[in-house]
Amino acid sequence: MRDLRKPGWVSIVLSAFTFLFLLFPLVIIIFASFSPTQILKFPPQSFSLQWYENIFTSSSKFIQGLIYSLEIGAVATVVDIALGVMACLAVSRYTFKGRQALTVFFTSPMFVPSITFGFVLLRIFTRMHGVSAFIQILTGHVVIILPYIIRNTLAIMSGFDWNLEDASASLGADPVYTFFHVTLPLVSPGITAGALLAFLYSFDEAVVARLLHGINFNTLPVIIMNYMTFDFDPTVAAISSILIVASLLLMIVVERVIGLDVFLKS
Amino acid sequence: MSYLEIDNLTKQFGATTAVDHFNLHVEQGEMVALLGGSGCGKTTILRMIAGFLEPTEGSIRINGRTMNEIPPYKRNVAIFFQNYALFPHLTVYNNIAYGLKQKKMPKAEIQKKVADFVHLVRLEGLEKRYPRELSGGQQQRVALARALVMEPSVLLLDEPLSNLDAKLRIEMQVEIRQLQKKLNVTTIIVTHDQEEAVSLADKILVMSEGHLLQEGDPREVFNYPASPFLADFMGFTNFIYGTLQEVKDGKYYISARKTGEMLVAGGNAPADLKTGDSVVAAIRPGNVAGVSGRQDDRKENIYTGRVSAVTYKGNISQVDILEAFDTPLHMHCADYTGPMDGGEVTVYLPPEKLLIYKA
């Protein structure tokens, strides 16, 4: 008789194709980044680091864009952790009328197309004059990445035993002490998972960032898009390869520190 | 003046009244049980004493100080939760030390106090474990130590033994009682288990739907429930309906409904009972005695019925008897050897064990 715990050949083939489909483009990109010529040849003829060099020397200021992207991602994530955790505490600790509606509202930016949202923000900021591109893009990102933090934090809070807060209070701890010594340590895996997803979304976001860009203020995805409009050399492949390796390292760190399964819990 | 005084305590949730003008005075060091089924308001009272819920009306005073406006973290009222609510991210030591650390007590003093209480609840060697690495009984001891180390003015126990198996429950009953007496801490225990209440408390209050139904010492509440409802709750599962025919020498003669059999009862009865009143007599299944036909000079309260089911329950067997009265009769025997399903059985109901209520 067949062993039911072992996967059948259909699921093996399907999984193999899925992995191939996901990973094959990455392999091509990494090969392309070391290509000696502008056009990718397969198999590669020789090996070159010129496109990596081009990242630093190109007039497109990739490094400046990377710094802006990291800044916006970091500030937006920190602001949203504060906002998101407070919002989640409100809707999961208390029962009140409109609680469900409020939860939906907090996650609603996920359902609004970025192009629409970006367009509205552009109209508003154009009328306001003098708002820096940094603040404009930051505002947009604070709104669109909030749902990722809310969803992950709510998921972990829905299983939280609120008796623990009462137990802490009965032992003499005031609400602030209780929050930092009981609630926060126990929900932090959810917050961390949400914050990582939110940061990556902001880092990768191009539509709002493109619409609200300044003359000298472009985030990395926008610079890459602009670059590709005129040049199609493997510089972008080199940047992508660096980002792939960086993401991989980040995932390894997350797995070591809190475990990747936090992403599956929400 | 009592140590803990609760007067006219009322709690309304919207249109429903969870607790209705509840009064309770507890002396220093006393242990009182609030007994009742789920939704009777006992847990609501507990949460109001702890300060997690605000009373709609009435007052709570501890040692003369009104507590109504005081937040839970300033009350020095410790609560023991049904699910223990141990901090899962802290070790046994840090769970017990939590309240003391928060008070910014010197480290050496904390170490000494925690060590004392770890010893008191017999958890030596487990200080570095996390709650999930402990058995249910051990977790319970941690929760108890964590509450008691604060030297609370009042200790609240919410269904403390409901999550333990039978053997451990009896062990912990004894242990809780000893600790409570040793530390002389004023304690209120909330439970739905009448056995737990009678074995732990100095005084029992039986509640239903936010109202106090009966208050008294455990023996009184257990043996003389004040109403048929309470009798049922206390394990009197046999109710025999009838009409009072005569009262003679402190004995009540009742003709049973439908069968007309004469029943003699003498347990206790309402003072204003008159001949011709409809009454109900209640008796515990453990007080129903099987009679093996031939013997007996007893003339009263011998009845014959048909066995409808015999349920083996380990230490006892429950025998369900039909046709003796119009309601089924339950009998508990330690070692039942009588007739099985469908067979005839004769039983004796001791008059002094039959309580009489107005029907």
Image (cartoon, rainbow, N blue to C red):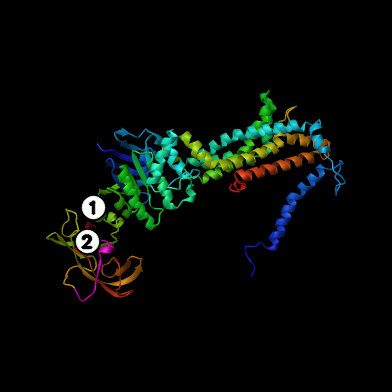
Q: Earlier in the sequence, mark 1 or mark 2?
A: 1
Place residue A88 in its image quadrant.
top right
Residue with the mark numbered 2: B353
State the residue position of label 1.
B220
A256 left or right, relative to B296:
right
Q: Residue at x 32, y 66 (%)?
A: B316
Task: Give the percent coordinates (x, y) of residue B192.
Answer: 35, 52
Q: Quadrant of residue A79?
A: top right
| Magenta stretch in the rendered image | B278-295
Tell me which amino acid carries mark 2.
Lys
Q: Is B182 in front, or is B329? A: B182
The answer to whether any part of residue B53 appears in the image is yes
| As drawn, A249 above or below A7 | above
In depth, the one of B240 and A4 nearer the eye is A4
Q: Position of residue B356 (x, y in %)?
A: 21, 58
Residue B184 position, x and y percent, is 30, 42
A2 or B254: nearer the viewer: A2
Chain hosting mark 2:
B
Quadrant where the N terminus of chain A lies? bottom right
The amino acid type of the residue labelled 1 equals: Glu
Which residue sits furthest bottom?
B294
Say few, some or many: other residues with alpha carbon within 10 Å of mark 1 (under 14 / 14 to 19 / 20 or more): some
